[in-house]
Image: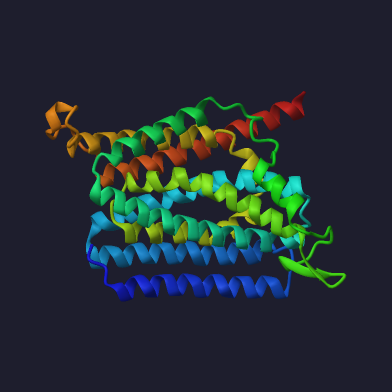
């Protein structure tokens, strides 16, 4: 794709305008959003993503559109996994319900900034070193194995790392909750509790970006599609947090589903790396004629994996609830 500079700037400008509007709106009136409010906003974001994909189809063809939809669905599914950690962080810091939107909004902004940096770094690495796909593929398969073998109670508690504990001891702060990140107390500028929540969310975002960026580069090598798929996935994350907070606990097989998804993309990356091989110690530096997985198959596999994961999770939860009532 030959994306003009003005399109890049317009895309980032629109995303920044939406985020600024959200921040100002939430800061002025901290509240717990209703299901109608978050449902309407989420529907707008999802509809916008679908229309954007159709626009790519019209401008660049079905293959590019398929790459966008596959990337968007993958990033969305990984973002849902992020919500588990966000819920745990909110509970750990005992964030009042009306201030959770503010913390989430800043966490999402940090995630967008970090992923934008990672996207351009990843694009530069891919353009210069084709063997980076070996690393991306191996890392995704390793992550998939970790997800598959982790215990259900592994993420039930959030443990602050050394850096976060150091910041809490070093930075002057107040115990009073506020919509502001910093405030004044006894004439001194101090951090509010929400500052440390945002810091924890930002550090979590950094870890998740290490998974999500290699995953989407396994579906497309176009930085613009990678960026927009991430933007659309993250834009609705705050609404998703409030809309399906209770439903998340019912997705008991989500980790297994994501493990299968990441393993699939990891294998796809390894196959692509072999096809483009230039490493001298593998096949003498010559390309290996292995089959590559087309984007249509990737998109279909993603839909099937996520669909089966959701249906199986809800079936298992309903079965357990029924057995609990009977016993």
Write the residue at 52% across / 40% down: 310
Q: Position of residue 45 (x, y in %)?
A: 50, 64
Let me know if residue 161 appears in the view: no
Residue nearest the observer in this picture, 187 or 56: 187
Visual colour scheme = rainbow
Write the residue at 74% across / 53% down: 170
Using residue 42 as the reference point, say whether residue 290 is left or right of it: left
Using residue 193 as the reference point, say whether residue 296 is left or right of it: left
- Which residue ends up furthest to the right in the rendered image? 186
Using residue 273 as the reference point, say whether residue 50 is left or right of it: right
Q: Position of residue 126 (x, y in %)?
A: 28, 48
Using residue 132 as the reference point, say whether residue 80 is left or right of it: right
Q: Quadrant of residue 117?
A: bottom left
Residue nearest the observer in this picture, 317 or 208: 208
Quadrant, the N terminus: bottom left
Quadrant, the C terminus: top right
Write the residue at 24% across / 68% down: 59
Let me know if residue 318 appears in the view: yes
Write the residue at 12% across / 28% down: 284
Q: Quadrant of residue 227?
A: bottom left
Q: Quadrant of residue 223?
A: bottom left
Q: Position of residue 124 (x, y in %)?
A: 30, 54
Q: Position of residue 123 (x, y in %)?
A: 31, 53
């Amino acid at each position: 794709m030959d994306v003009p500079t003005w399109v890049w700037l317009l895309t980032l400008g629109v995303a920044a305008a939406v985020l600024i509007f959200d921040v100002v709106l939430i800061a002025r009136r901290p509240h717990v959003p209703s299901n109608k409010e978050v449902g309407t906003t989420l529907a707008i974001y999802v509809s916008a993503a679908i229309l954007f994909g159709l626009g790519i189809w019209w401008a660049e063809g079905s293959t590019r559109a398929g790459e966008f939809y596959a990337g968007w669905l993958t990033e969305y599914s990984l973002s849902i996994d992020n919500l588990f950690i966000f819920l745990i962080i909110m509970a750990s810091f005992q964030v009042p319900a009306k201030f959770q939107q503010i913390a989430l909004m800043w966490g999402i902004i940090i995630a967008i900034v970090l992923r934008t940096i990672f996207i351009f770094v990843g694009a530069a690495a891919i353009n210069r070193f084709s063997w980076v796909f070996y690393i991306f593929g191996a890392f995704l398969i390793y992550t998939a194995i970790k997800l598959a073998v982790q215990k259900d109670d592994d993420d039930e508690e959030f443990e602050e790392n050394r850096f976060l504990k150091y910041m809490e001891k070093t930075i002057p702060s107040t115990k009073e909750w506020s919509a502001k990140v910093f405030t004044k107390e006894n004439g001194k500028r101090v951090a509010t509790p929400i500052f440390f929540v945002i810091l924890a969310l930002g550090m979590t975002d950094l870890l998740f970006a290490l998974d999500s960026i290699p995953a989407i580069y396994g579906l497309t090598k176009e930085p613009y599609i990678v960026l927009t798929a991430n933007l659309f996935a993250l834009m609705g994350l705050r609404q998703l947090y409030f809309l399906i907070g209770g439903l998340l606990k019912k997705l008991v097989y989500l980790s297994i589903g994501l493990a299968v998804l990441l393993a699939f993309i990891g294998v796809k990356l390894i196959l692509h790396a072999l096809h483009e091989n230039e490493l001298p110690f593998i096949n003498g530096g010559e390309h290996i004629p292995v089959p590559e997985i087309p984007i249509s198959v990737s998109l279909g596999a993603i839909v099937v994996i996520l669909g089966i994961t959701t249906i199986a999770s809800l079936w298992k939860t309903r079965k357990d609830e029924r057995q609990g009532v009977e016993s």
